[in-house]
Amino acid sequence: MIRITEPRFSEEEKEAVLNILESGQITRGEWTGRFSREFARYVGVKHCFTVCSGTTALFVALKALGVDRGDRVVVPAMSFMATIDAVYLAGGEPVVVDVDRFYTMDPNQLEDAVKRYRPKVVVPVHLYGCMADMEAIMYLSEKYGFYVVEDSAQAHGAEYGGRKAGSWGHVGVFSFYASKNVPMGEGGAITTDDDRIAERVRKWIDFGDHPAFNFRITEFQAAIGTIQLRKLDERNSRRRSIAEFYTRSFSDYFDVPLERDNSLHVYHLYTLRHAERDRIVEELRSSGVDARVYYPYLLHEIRGSEHLPTPRAETFRKEVFSIPVHPYLTEEEISFVVETLTEIVSSGKIIS
Ligand SMILES: Cc1ncc(COP(=O)(O)O)c(C=O)c1O
């Protein structure tokens, strides 16, 4: 099976992990500080705090911005469930809005939601590696006075208007789960340029206020993340060139992913759309290509959250599927994916 994603490590990571073991400094050591500094510099912000997962990063970001009982938080209909779970865990009341044709929060509907619900925080998600329309969202943030937390779990290195994911909003959050563009195994980060917000984040993760959690990562994770981060740009360009080839090959048969003007899509996932999605995914999987649906649910369905009409997301949810685009695919594997999928849609097996 050609896997949808796979992390890969070299001698460098192995050596760093062995050195950590030998040193005995397995947590709160040099690597943890180094990772935070290098990630902050990479994103282009002053502060970066590591935590044990992306979900934790979202939770801490919301708490640091003061989200509490009954505060409204707007999220898009399409994302991994952690985006909305974190709102509930922080005590907030989510409001779900539709996505645009890039699969990210629709700023027009966001404005309707903001007028109606007056949210404290808005959480755009840079889904599949494509940044949300941050210019429009930050304009609304200024106009109506809400905080913005960018869920950048799928967008390490993505750019819009020359600025990286995690540097547009008041806060950025990242995941370093095994499948992400920067994998650590598990891990997360919170980025911000604002000293006051940074201070509040610090209190949440370092026993500044009580009762408190321990959300730390180990030196092993930080070392793996630091070394993987140094390879990120090269790997993102490999993802982009595979995606470019896929888009050229598939645009006659599918709705292919779109790239915003003035942006850099980092193809955490390469996602196509077709009305016969379920049969295509089944055929692909039985031919040895690991195709998956991200995500089969809409966020407001999980717990029956407040939402605006979501016609786009409702169609997309039935039609989207993702195919392998990770940077370690060989030329043969890429050709196999293209040939197999083209054969499935053009052989008459699938009637579009
Ligand atoms: C968009 C999005 N948000 C949040 C998360 C949560 O991250 P984690 O799995 O590290 O808790 C993920 C990934 O898993 C994600 O894809």
Image (tube, rainbow, N blue to C red):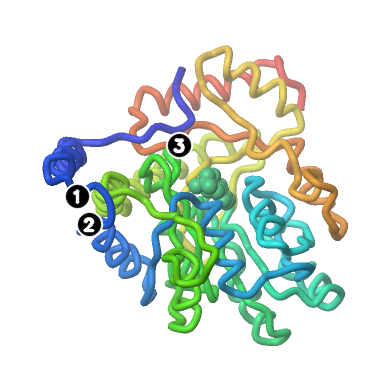
Q: Secondary structure at mark 3?
A: loop
- The answer to whether 145 is drawn above or below residue 329 in the figure is below
User: What residue type is disc 2 on?
Assistant: Gly
Which residue in the protein does label 3 denote? Answer: 325
The crowding category of the residue bearing disc 2, from other C-alpha atoms within 10 Å (few below 14, some 14 to 19, many at least 20), is some
Which residue in the protein does label 2 denote? Answer: 29
Residue 216 drawn at (x, y percent): 39, 54
Q: Quadrant of residue 278?
A: top right
Residue lying at 41% horizontally and 37% vertically, measured from the top left: 326
Q: Secondary structure at mark 1?
A: loop
Residue 96 drawn at (x, y percent): 78, 58
| Residue 115 visible to an observer of this rendering | yes
Q: Nearer the viewer, residue 338 or 20?
A: 20
Residue 212 drawn at (x, y percent): 51, 62
The crowding category of the residue bearing disc 3, from other C-alpha atoms within 10 Å (few below 14, some 14 to 19, many at least 20), is many
Circles 3 and 2, Cβ within 8 Å, touching? The answer is: no
Quadrant where the C terminus sits is top right
